[in-house]
Amino acid sequence: MGRGKKDENKICLSAEQRHRLEDISRNGHAPAKKILHAQVLLMADEGEWATRHWTDEEIAAALNLHRNTVGRIRYRFLADGEQPALNRRVRATPPVAPVVDGHLEAQIIALCCSEAPEGRTRWTLELLTQQLKARQIVAQISRETVRRTFKKNKLRPWKVERFCIPERDLPRFVAQMEVVLDLYSSEHTADAPLVCMDEAAYQLQSDLYSPVEMEPGQDTKEGYHYQREGMQSLFMFFDPNRGWRRVSQRDSRTSIDWAEEVRQLLDVDYPDVPVVKLLSDNLNTYNIDSLYKAFPALEAHRLARRLILYHTPRNGSWLNGAETELSVLSRQCLDRRIASPAELKNELEAWQQERNQSAAKVIWKFTTDDARVKLKHLYPVFEAAT
């Protein structure tokens, strides 16, 4: 076992042992503890192959260890051999029973997925911990144990996702959806551009107290209370292929407002274009009737001849590219308090100018073929003819 003949505490390595330990200390692939223990044994070697005699204190100082650690490694080598001295001792610990077994976990899941008690919106960690004890499901359990069970089973009672189910019993939704998807996939020329249109409401607000500006080590602060200064309707016109957009504001969003915005689109934004393909949602004011309501028949007819209307289906506003652009506008420009229509106008014009200079476009890749695969559950089911 490498013991000296004269001194029971002396480590004398054979040439084979020393070569093996040197390989371990140099290769860098062994565990760090094993490499460290190999270095201790090499430095503690007092055999014929050793080049220097190191005391335990010197070894401990050189390897940044405690003297007792060096002594334990020496003792294990002399008592048990090379491998026990190199490797960590495996402690025999009795198995610990899990706090939450399968049966209790199933009961926690069932309770969490049930309706919350009267007077409470949803289950919380504290409420669930209390109810598990009150219903005598378990005698004692901590909030942290319940939290780990939540995390393990991906239970999030505080999170609610909303969804909108189209009319699955009618082919109307998929029919209008495929029209819009085919429209995006079609080629659009300069003489017949595609323009997406959407609108949104924006509430003007002013501060009751002047906000505190940000400084190093201090965040911006603004008063919780504010003064409502009225509403503005925003109209977004967006050409996804050209990378152009126009956003305007109005006091209302009536059919007259829409008709006047369309006339500006045709006569100011696209004056030399024979026809514009306009995609909007299915609001009842977005139709040719509104042109005849706002203008004389001759003028309405002139505008109508240059306009081809397309509508997204109900519950299908995600098909409108202008909705994406409104989301960008909200994040980049409108996520703050703006007090007056004039201030709003200046901010919209600045945002619009910068965005048009970058010519940010939308590349639509979701096609009709993709919809028939990924949205197959929305399509009517037909039985095979016999």
Image (cartoon, helix red, strand yellow):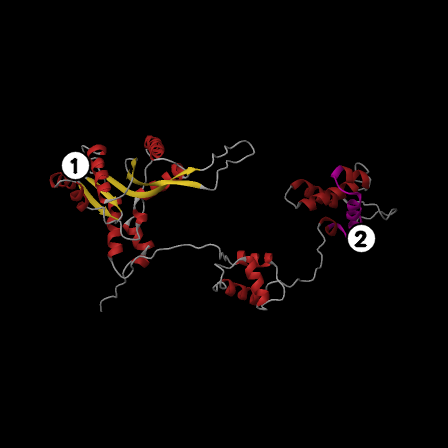
Q: Which residue is mark 1?
A: 274
Residue, x 74% and y 46% (percent of image)?
Answer: 17
Location of residue 302 with respect to 177 vertically, above or below? above
Residue, x 24% and y 38% (percent of image)?
Answer: 261
7 sits left or right of 267 in the view: right
Disc 1 crowd, CA 10 A, few/some/many (<14, 14-19, 20+): some
Task: Where is residue 42? Give x, y as percent.
Answer: 76, 42
Q: CA distance from mark 2 to mark 1?
A: 98 Å
Dividing the picture into quarters, in which one does residue 160 lie?
Answer: bottom left
Location of residue 103 with respect to 195 vertically, above or below? below
- Which callout, 2 or 1, points to the residue nearer the camera? 1
- Label 2 element class: helix
N-term-proximal mark, 2 vs 1 = 2
Task: Where is residue 374? Give x, y as percent.
Answer: 34, 54
Instruction: Residue lying at the far left in this picture: please name it.
Output: 298
Q: Which residue is mark 2?
A: 79
Task: Where is residue 201? Give x, y as percent.
Answer: 33, 43
347 sits left or right of 52 in the view: left
Task: Identify the disc placed on residue 195.
Answer: none
Location of residue 192 with respect to 369 vertically, above or below? above
**Amino acid bearing label 1:** Pro
| Residue 101 in sight in this render | no
Residue, x 78% and y 51% (percent of image)?
Answer: 76
**Residue 81 part of the magenta-drawn span:** yes
Task: Where is residue 347? Give x, y as percent.
Answer: 36, 33
| Image: magenta residue range | 62-82
334 sits left or right of 35 in the view: left
Q: Nearer the viewer, residue 290 or 224?
A: 224
Location of residue 236 with respect to 72 vertically, above or below? above
Quarter holding the C terminus is: bottom left
